[in-house]
């Protein structure tokens, strides 16, 4: 198998890794309760999605 002839520098290694940084997930506000939630997901606070109650809220029980 081929092996590298010379060692790659730290700069070259870091250039390759420059696109590996993590970014914050996009958040949107729930129209019902105003809490931040992931887009296209059920609100974990009130349990609604697109204006409909999908999960029964613990507060109402």
Image (tube, grey):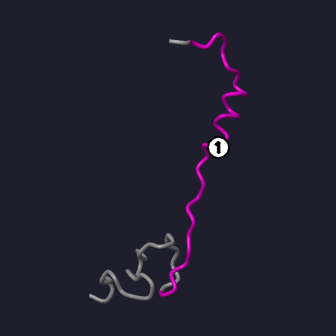
- Residue 32 appears at what percent x and percent y? 48, 87
- Residue 9 appears at what percent x and percent y? 70, 21
Name which residue lies at 50% across and 12% down.
1
The answer to which of 56 and 13 lies nearer the viewer is 13
Name which residue lies at 60% across and 43% down.
20
8 in relation to 53, above or below: above
Was residue 28 drawn as part of the magenta stretch in this picture? yes
Q: Quadrant of residue 13?
A: top right
18 in relation to 8, above or below: below
6 in relation to 49, above or below: above
Q: Is residue 40 left or right of residue 16?
A: left
Name which residue lies at 33% across and 83% down.
57
| Main SS, magenta residues | loop
- Residue 56 appears at what percent x and percent y? 30, 83
3 in relation to 31, above or below: above
Q: Which residue is mark 1?
A: 19
The region drawn magenta spans 3-32
Was residue 15 drawn as part of the magenta stretch in this picture? yes
Residue found farthest to the front: 1
Identify the secondary structure beneath mark 1.
Answer: helix
- Residue 60 appears at what percent x and percent y? 31, 89
Name which residue lies at 64% across and 36% down.
17
Q: Classify 10 Å Cα crowding around label 1: few (below 14), some (14-19), many (20 and above).
A: few
The answer to which of 55 and 2 lies nearer the viewer is 2
Residue found farthest to the right: 11
The answer to which of 56 and 5 lies nearer the viewer is 5
**Total numbered labels:** 1
Q: Is residue 42 left or right of residue 16?
A: left
Residue found farthest to the left: 61
Which image quadrant: the C terminus? bottom left
Q: Is residue 29 left or right of residue 44?
A: right
């Amino acid at each position: 198998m081929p092996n590298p002839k010379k060692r790659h520098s730290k700069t070259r290694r870091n250039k390759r890794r420059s696109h590996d940084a993590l970014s914050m997930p996009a958040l949107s506000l729930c129209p019902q309760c105003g809490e931040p939630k992931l887009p296209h997901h059920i609100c974990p606070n009130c349990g609604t999605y697109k204006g409909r109650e999908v999960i029964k809220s613990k507060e109402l029980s």
